[in-house]
Image (cartoon, helix red, strand yellow):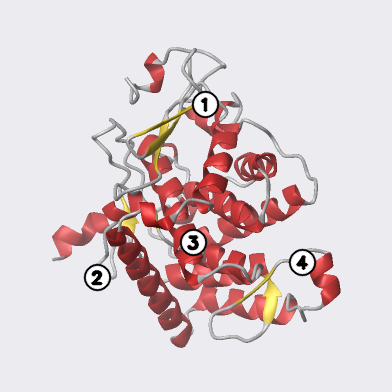
Amino acid sequence: AQFRSSRKLVLNMPRRSFAFGYTTLYANTNQAQGLAEFAIDFMERDPKKIDQAVWDRVRLFHTDSVLCGISALALRTNAPTILRREAIRQYSVEPTRSHQEEKVRISKCFGSKVWTHSEKAIAANCSAVREWDSNGTVFGYNPIVGHKAGEFGHNDYYPVVIAACHNDPKYTGMDALQGMLLLDEIRGRLCEVFSLKSYKIDHVVHGAIASACVYGAMLGANALEIEHAIGMVVAHYIPWRAIRAGKQLSDSKGASAALSTEVAIQSVHRAMNGFIGPKDIFRNPEALFRQFEPTSSDDVSPFDLVLSNSRDDFAVMGMHFKLGLYEHQSASAID
């Protein structure tokens, strides 16, 4: 009963349920708020409740992404080089006490000692790790709970967590892994319940939402602030798959995750400074989710969302490596 389709939901279901190592955010609830609360709670969880195999998997994917990023920069690929130069030359910051008091968030680009505005460093680093299109991939398919939307998604977003750690000296390497696991979990589970590509929307929207959740939680934002940031991402910054249309090649495809994450991080900053974004965005009748998948009631979104919080059944455990520089859809033919 816990995993019923949202189209058959009984409207008096609880807001969240916790069972068998899972948290379920039902369609008849404010899931943006639920994601924010889940992220805050997750970052406070004891990592020992999660199997070692999961941490090994996250560490493996993070190492792979860093090597991909360094390689792209070493070979002077276009978008990563441009975004890195932009961050360092135009948005560099000398950390001072006044910056800390004004809560200017800072981070570093790959291979640089220069502090820069965090959203710019994140954009540069996400672009670099994504450039070769060789990152881990989830396929949005979880038959155990009946979630088979089949959206793709990649682990391009780890620089978000590193940037959050740069802004709080209490964070350890273990905390960073926990943030990365959380980001992959939110992103991967959204891929299971809503297929963006079916409506010509780029899959990076799920990554941007997850980035806002995790970055906000790690910077100390409260649930309402994170909800406002998610609302801004969905209401203002939806990328269409025009970047992938036809035979054209552009920097926009490879940098899509970077550019969406940049505005997600900026949305978190604004929300933490008091900006009020749209609330309850998944049930908003004029946001993309209910526009493309209408529901019979304003009380529900198109889906339930099931998130893991312990043991070993995390979205990252279903991610795959690309063993060649080509799309997964072409792999069997090329091999």
Residue depicted at x 32% and y 69%: 60
Give the x, y percent position of residue 243.
48, 55
Marks 1, 4: nearer the viewer: 4
- Quarter residue 108 falls in: bottom right
Q: How many marks?
A: 4
Discs 3, 2 touching: Cβ within 8 Å? no
Dot 4 falls on a residue whose secondary structure is loop
Marks 2, 4: nearer the viewer: 4
If you read the primary sequence from the N terminus, does the residue marked by circle 1 or circle 3 appear first?
3
The three-letter code of the residue at mark 1 reads Arg
The three-letter code of the residue at mark 3 reads Tyr
Compared with residue 161, is residue 329 higher up or lower down, i.e. above or below?
above
Q: Quadrant of the C terminus?
A: bottom left
If you read the primary sequence from the N terminus, does the residue marked by circle 1 or circle 2 appear first?
1
Nearest the eye: 94 or 256: 94
Q: Identify the residue under disc 1.
A: 290
Give the x, y percent position of residue 257.
50, 59
Dot 1, how many residues are within 10 Å of its Cα: few (below 14), some (14-19), or many (20+)?
some
Dot 3 falls on a residue whose secondary structure is loop
Q: Identify the residue under disc 2.
A: 324
The three-letter code of the residue at mark 2 reads Gly
Nearest the eye: 164 or 141: 164
Compared with residue 145, is residue 44 higher up or lower down, i.e. above or below?
below
Q: Identify the residue under disc 3.
A: 157
Regarding residue 36, the answer to whether it shows in the image is yes
Q: Identify the residue under disc 4.
A: 104
